[in-house]
């Protein structure tokens, strides 16, 4: 592997969330030093994910290509009247680990961020409004990150849903300001969801 190739790998790894320059460099060196073992295994796993994992066409959660709509959408035991809106598919797993939410999900795949040039048309907002209109949703839980952009997105969505007569709630206390669903521990998230408040 040339040094240019190592630099390209480092740059690619840096694009992953939570990976800084030093961590990316260490990962790149580790992969380069074990090409037949670790690198080959990683390449295979990435190829399988690329081929077999996709976003659910209905809710936006990650699912296998042979199960679309996903298990959350097709599970008849889930409460179809309550919809939990999250920014990222990883947030669903955090909420599921609490065992307290039994409704369905809607993944925005982003948030409104004027600084990054991302507006309402850049997230799955139209799909959310359509679901609320056609599925008879009675409550929408906005489980978005508690930073400025997450709060602004929540307020924007709440205003749209109030016009349609939908009850809009947010998880209550416990999620630190500037943090998000996937960073909260299970107990904190469980309490926040159980004591959710109307927006």
Image: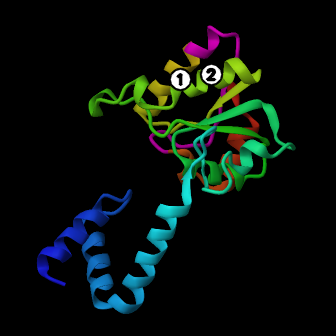
The residue beneath circle 1 is 126
Q: Nearer the viewer, residue 175 or 143?
A: 143
> Overall secondary structure of the magenta stretch?
loop
* Residue at (46, 77) in percent of width and height: 44
Q: CA distance from mark 2 to mark 1?
A: 6 Å
Region in magenta: 160-179
Location of residue 5 (image quadrant): bottom left
Which numbered dot is residue 130?
A: 2
User: Mark 2: few, some, or many residues within 10 Å (few <14, many ≥20)?
Assistant: few
Q: Are marks 2 and 1 in contact (CB under 8 Å)?
A: yes
Give the image quarter of residue 83.
top right
- Residue drawn at the location 47% of the way across and 26% of the way down: 153
Residue 137 visible in the current orientation: no
Could you tell me which secondary element the residue under label 2 belongs to? helix
Q: Which colouring convention does the figure follow?
A: rainbow
Residue shown at the point (31%, 26%) measured from the top left: 114
* Residue 116 falls within the magenta-colored stretch: no
Residue 128, how many percent across, how many down?
Answer: 59, 26
Q: Is residue 79 left or right of residue 192?
A: right
Q: Is residue 117 above or below residue 87?
A: above
Q: Is residue 85 above or below residue 72?
A: above
Q: Nearer the viewer, residue 152 or 160?
A: 160
């Amino acid at each position: 592997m040339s040094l240019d190739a190592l630099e390209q790998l480092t740059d690619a790894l840096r694009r992953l969330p939570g990976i800084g320059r030093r961590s990316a460099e260490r990962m790149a060196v580790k992969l380069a030093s074990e090409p037949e073992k670790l690198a080959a295994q990683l390449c295979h796993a990435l190829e399988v994910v690329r081929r077999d994992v996709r976003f659910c066409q209905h809710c936006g959660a990650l699912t296998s290509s042979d199960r679309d709509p996903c298990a959350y959408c097709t599970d008849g035991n889930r409460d179809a009247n309550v919809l939990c809106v999250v920014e990222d598919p990883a947030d669903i797993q955090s909420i599921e680990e609490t065992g307290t939410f039994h409704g369905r999900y809607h993944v925005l795949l982003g948030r409104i961020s004027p600084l990054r040039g991302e507006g309402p048309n850049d997230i799955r907002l139209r799909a959310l409004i359509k679901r609320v209109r056609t599925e008879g949703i009675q409550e929408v839980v906005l489980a978005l990150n508690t930073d400025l952009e997450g709060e602004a997105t929540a307020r924007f969505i709440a205003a749209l849903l109030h016009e349609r007569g939908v009850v809009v709630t947010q998880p209550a206390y416990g999620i630190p300001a500037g943090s998000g669903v996937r960073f909260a521990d299970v107990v904190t998230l469980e309490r926040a969801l159980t004591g959710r408040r109307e927006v």
